[in-house]
Image (cartoon, rainbow, N blue to C red):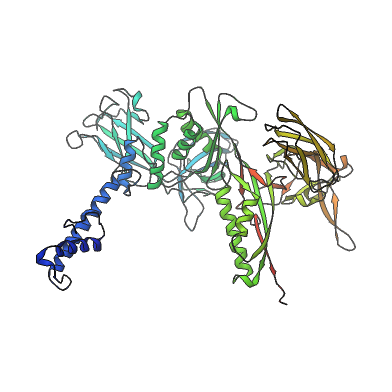
Amino acid sequence: MSDRLRVTELDFDAIKTNLKDFLRQQSEFQDYDFEGAGLNVLLDILAYNTHYNAYYTNMIANESFLDSALLRNSVVSHAKKLGYTPRSKRAAIATVNIAVDTANSSPGSSTISKGFNFVSNEIDGRSFNFTTLSSYTTAKTANTFVFSNIEIYEGQIVTYNYVQSNLSNPKQIFNIPDADIDTSTLKVSIRPSVSNTDITIHNLADDILSLTATDEVYFLQEGTNGNYQIYFGNDVFGKSVPDGGVVSLEYLTCSGSIPNSSNNFVTVNTIDGYTNIVVDSISKAAGGSERETVDEIKFAAPLNNLSQNRAVTKNDYINLIQQKYPYFEAVNVWGGEENDPPVYGKVFVSAKPALGFEVTDTIKEYVKEQILKPISVLTVTPEIVDVDYNYLKVESSIYYDQNKTNLNDSEIISAVRQLILNYADTNLNQFNTYFNYSGLERSIQDYSSSFTSNEIDFRVGKKFRPDLTTSNTYNLEFGFQLRRGSTNDTFFSTPDFTILDSDGAQRTCFFEEIPSSFTGVESVTILNGGFNYTSTPTVNIIGDGVGATALATIVNGKVSKITVTNPGIGYTTATVRITGGGGSIAQASAVLEGRYGSMRISYYKPDEVTSEQTKIVLNSTVNSGIVGVIDYVAGKITINDFNPISVNNNFGDITIYCTPNTNVIQSSLNKMLVLDQDDPTSVVVKTTKIRWAIT
């Protein structure tokens, strides 16, 4: 046996056992009772001391690397070496219109000064202060001053002044005492001395390679205590602060993400002495976010170093937008050459906010002008594109053996509903993802062995907000083929809306597809000709009709043409499978007869005698009541000359639901498939007990 100590143990008990084994190898301690002797205390001290040193050394080693560091100041220090400054809190921004009634028509102008305060409605029992970061001036119209599109920021404006002393502060580092600062609002100015009123504005340095000795810039960093610091140049990279100079800081302190969705603002003070003030919300508060966490810093710092604060690739745009504006839950970027139709010289950006579905014009302009343009390649123009949402509605029917589970109906419904929501969090609500019917069906089936089967019925909806004052045409593009229906079960709209019929009477109506009969397969479109075909493959047309057949033509080992020899009858859906012929991967799709369908507006009218509801087609004598066209292949609905007078929901939106002609739906470019959290019927779960007879 070796008489050397083993130095690989780090656990206290292992260290102490190691020391005992070593001592027992000595002749003086071979038969020594370590547990009952005073030497046991000394061994405890030695083991503890060794354990402490091992733990301390291990922690120091961990903090030496960005990936393994745990302490925030260690992570921030590593990020600084990569040129990365952690993001601070961001203030929520709202947009309002303000009308000030003066009760007189004499001409004049009025100004809302910078720092004018508003108070929001309560969120979780707490209201928030909002303020202006700029001043606004307007002229009087009749008796009223109208201020339009005023941006108000949650928080409070704070100012600090520091006098530079080269003796006590040779590095010219100034601490910002507020941890709740929104650094994007920070303004830095310098006066040469206390008595000198000349002010120079210093901007945040974002590219050290372009700096000269006279550039009036400042640098920003997070200090070891978690608060931010600013510092200045050394007269080589940026201008330094003169001894005795006065450094003035002005910024906003905010509450981060908590005030998001604040609305219904009221003013705190008068405007030019007037008190009759009406504040109309244009967009509720959005964009507020918390300061960057340790994990977020560790993820973003290396990516920032790779991009060097320049947006060249799509990932550069995505990473820099998410770093500088974390309000977005998902961001997608694509080049103009990928657009349909192609638009060269542009890069398109689409983003889904963390709350809700719409990005306000204020936020779009901020992202475009303040984030994208400074980092974009000179010849590339960024453009913000609204997300084109498809809204998924899922109905799951569960059949289960009650003898194989202790769960009751409500528990199964709750569990399956949560499973569907988890699936949506993972596979939906993002760009460049897929909804897979079979994947969702399988995950539900695998939840419990008591499930004998489950059926999923899903629809996809498209929302639009009609103008209630004038007649318009609306185009809804789903982005996938739609299934035609012989009844109205594949197509419906919600909520109902009120419209005037040809006699001027108000009718509470809904959209519906005009049921049509189905015939056969009109043609077969080749998607991929495949390769290495040595003989004519077999073309199988599979669907819910009968009799459709087709014949393939081979040219140079590829399927070049497929001719329909018998269209068959009764098809509402059909797929094409190509087998045999010695080749592979040829793919084709079937085009059913009747690519286009029609839609109409209907309402229910109670019978005057029986009160039974009878469905009536609105204005059926005009063009058979047709108000729109459905292109099933292109997945597009066009509604013509639509002019309702009201919509029966708070948002004014109408959703038209259709059944996809595919079980796999892709989200790409600015299209996104989401579960509508505002719709409690977006996920419906039903259960049926299966009782097995015992014989």
Q: Is residue 343 left or right of residue 74?
A: right
User: Which quadrant of the rendered structure holds the C terminus?
Assistant: bottom right
Q: Is residue 254 above or below residue 557?
A: below
Q: Is residue 485 above or below residue 244?
A: below
Q: Is residue 641 visible?
A: no
User: Which quadrant of the rendered structure holds the N terminus?
Assistant: bottom left
Q: Quadrant of residue 586?
A: top right
In percent of width and height, residue 448 lies at 60, 64
Report the front residue among 611 and 583.
583
In percent of width and height, residue 51 lies at 22, 58
Q: Is residue 290 visible?
A: yes
Which residue appears farthest toward the bottom when viewing the image?
695
Report the front residue among 118 and 215.
215
Residue at (22%, 60%) from the top-left corner?
Answer: 15
In percent of width and height, residue 550 lies at 81, 37
Q: Is residue 667 left or right of residue 236?
A: right
In percent of width and height, residue 377 lies at 48, 25
Residue at (66%, 66%) from the top-left corner?
Answer: 400
Residue at (16%, 74%) from the top-left corner?
Answer: 36
Which residue appears farthest toward the left when viewing the image?
28
Q: Is residue 163 left or right of residue 411?
A: left
Q: Is residue 436 above or below residue 304?
A: below
